[in-house]
Image (tube, rainbow, N blue to C red):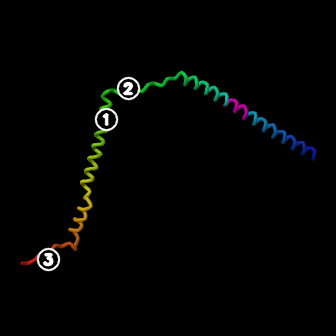
Amino acid sequence: MEKEMAEEKERKRQQRIEAKELKNARKAAQKAKEEGETKAWMEASKTFNDKYIPPLPKPRKEEEVPLMFKKKVEKEAEKKRKEMEMANQAPSTSESRTEHRRGDSFYKPSESFRIST
């Protein structure tokens, strides 16, 4: 009985070893395949890059350049106009102080301060 158990253990151990070897062989084959594909791909891309000439950018039409410049100038003018409007809407600090003072209850010009003659 002990002999059978020892044989069973040995057989399982041998199966594990074979499974590991098979797994390692599969990994090695996969790695070699990937390396081969990578080499082939790099060679193909190298020859492609040697032969490939990218298309030149389309030259701009003569009308496009002034149009682009005009749009830029219009944008800047619009921006300045908005800034001016905002500046006109917001009261300056001195004006806001006088407005506040005039509305203040302590600021009341009265007749009693007049010098009577």
Whether residue 29 is situated above or below residue 8 in the rendered picture = above
Question: In this orientation, which residue lies closer to the viewer: 9 or 115?
Answer: 115
Disc 1 on helix, strand or loop? helix
Amino acid, disc 1: Phe
Give the CA separation, mark 2 to mark 3.
81 Å
Question: In this orientation, which residue lies closer to the viewer: 38 or 6?
Answer: 38
109 displayed left or right of 47: left
Disc 2 on helix, strand or loop? loop
Q: Residue at x 24, y 66 (%)?
A: 100
Residue 19: image tag: none
Name the residue that disc number 1 marks: 69
Whether residue 23 is situated above or below residue 47 in the rendered picture = below
Q: Does the stretch in magenta take in 11?
A: no
Q: Mark 2 or mark 3: which is in front?
A: 3
Name the residue that disc number 2 marks: 59
Give the CA separation, mark 1 to mark 2.
17 Å
The magenta span reads 27-34
Query: Closer to the N terminus: mark 2 or mark 3?
Result: 2
Give the CA separation, mark 1 to mark 3.
65 Å
Residue 113: image tag: 3
Amino acid, disc 2: Pro
